[in-house]
Amino acid sequence: MSTLPEAGADLLGSNSLRLPCIADWCADVEDPSDLPALLSFARERSLPLHVLGGGSNVLLPEHLHGLVLRMRNRGIALLEDSATRRVIRAAAGEPWHPFVLHCHARGWYGFENLALIPGTVGAAPIQNIGAYGVELERFVLEVRGMDLHTGLPRVLDAAACAFSYRDSIFKGGLAGAFLITEVLFAVPADPVPCTGYAALAAELAHCPDPGHADVLSAVMSIRRRRLPDPAVLPNAGSFFKNPVIAAEEFERLLLAEPEVAHWRQSDGRVKLAAAWLVERCGWKGRRDAGAGVHEAQALVLVNHGGATAGALLDLAARIRDSVHERFGVTLELEPVPL
Ligand SMILES: Cc1cc2nc3c(=O)[nH]c(=O)nc-3n(C[C@H](O)[C@H](O)[C@H](O)COP(=O)(O)OP(=O)(O)OC[C@H]3O[C@@H](n4cnc5c(N)ncnc54)[C@H](O)[C@@H]3O)c2cc1C
């Protein structure tokens, strides 16, 4: 291993909520060939392993027991450029938004709707990142990495990743057991820009025949306007997933709440706007113990200063209870507590 893990590592600057956290040990993985030695280091000391990318979707405790593997390996390569598709390999430690810009600049279109999502390439499959009508799963060809129990390399194709809305096998059966070292993406050689999402369509209303560059700039403008920048006001983006409920349950809810914001799904179920539910329960702008609900975005919990993971989880639990009491709907957390 090129460098020894750091003892008592301060991770305050390594998570977008700026939660105070000291990890027993932390190593930056710049070269995946260091992984076997790092796994031995952890095994010899009976340390649990934790994987960290950009820290934009985690809730870190004040003391994190174990060895944190912070993915910092880099590299983007075009492996195939045929009449039908392009295959791109990207290292887990590549920052996501610069990766989107890198692909766009070379004409490898498709990722534009996912611009400006914070974090790394390696974390993107974990919750199947999605925005403005596109989810990552449509581009994933293979996820390559290491089984953290056996230390052996392993490759999963898209079907094995079991992607669904903000979910995958990496949050289910393989949670905590798989470290992603690189991802292979396939984008069509000539994709059609994806402009159907209502907010994006409205932003592009002035543009008669939007191309990929128009989609990229529209997505970036909407996000810059609507979402608080974690560098200014620490946050982890949406704190709750949009709940998806059965059609019969939705019809009952609609009778009581005719204005409930929702999207009908192709399987008959209905996705509700969690932000609408939280806002209706009066949470927008409220704060407690340094933790708060953003003034404009009810789905975004923020650290106004001095909040801990405990304070955010307390606030989230109270929000969840009030939404359940009023609407009978259960909200699920989006960020992952480590
Ligand atoms: C302002 C803001 C806006 C956001 N907007 C969106 C959005 O529009 N859509 C969306 O889907 N998400 C959004 N997010 C959430 C977040 O950006 C994504 O979930 C992102 O993929 C997290 O990447 P990360 O590298 O920061 O992961 P981390 O926060 O470091 O880790 C998240 C989880 O992935 C695991 N993990 C990370 N890297 C690896 C790896 N290489 N191998 C195995 N496990 C790994 C971690 O253990 C943890 O469980 C937003 C967040 C913020 C702060």
Image (tube, rainbow, N blue to C red):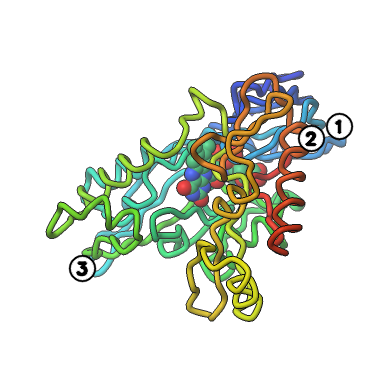
Q: Badge 1 is on which residue?
A: 45
Question: Which quarter of the frame holds ligand 1?
Answer: top right
* Residue 332 place in picture, x, y as percent: 68, 55
Could you say which disc has been placed on residue 55 in the image? none
Mark 3 or mark 1: which comes first in sequence?
1
For the residues marked 3 and 1, what is the alpha-carbon distance in whole angstroms? 52 Å
Q: Residue drawn at (66%, 40%), measured in percent from left and top?
A: 51
For label 2, the SS is: helix
Q: Residue drawn at (27%, 54%), measured in percent from left and top?
A: 202
Up-down relation of residue 301 to residue 278 (above or below)? above
Could you say which disc has been placed on residue 83 in the image? 3
* Residue 290 place in picture, x, y as percent: 69, 24
Mark 3 or mark 2: which comes first in sequence?
2
* Residue 126 place in picture, x, y as percent: 58, 53
Quadrant of image for the C terminus: top right
Q: Badge 2 is on which residue?
A: 42
Residue 321 is left or right of residue 153, and the answer is right
Residue found farthest to the left: 208
Residue 174 is left or right of residue 304, and the answer is right
Labels 2 and 1 touching (C-beta < 8 A): yes
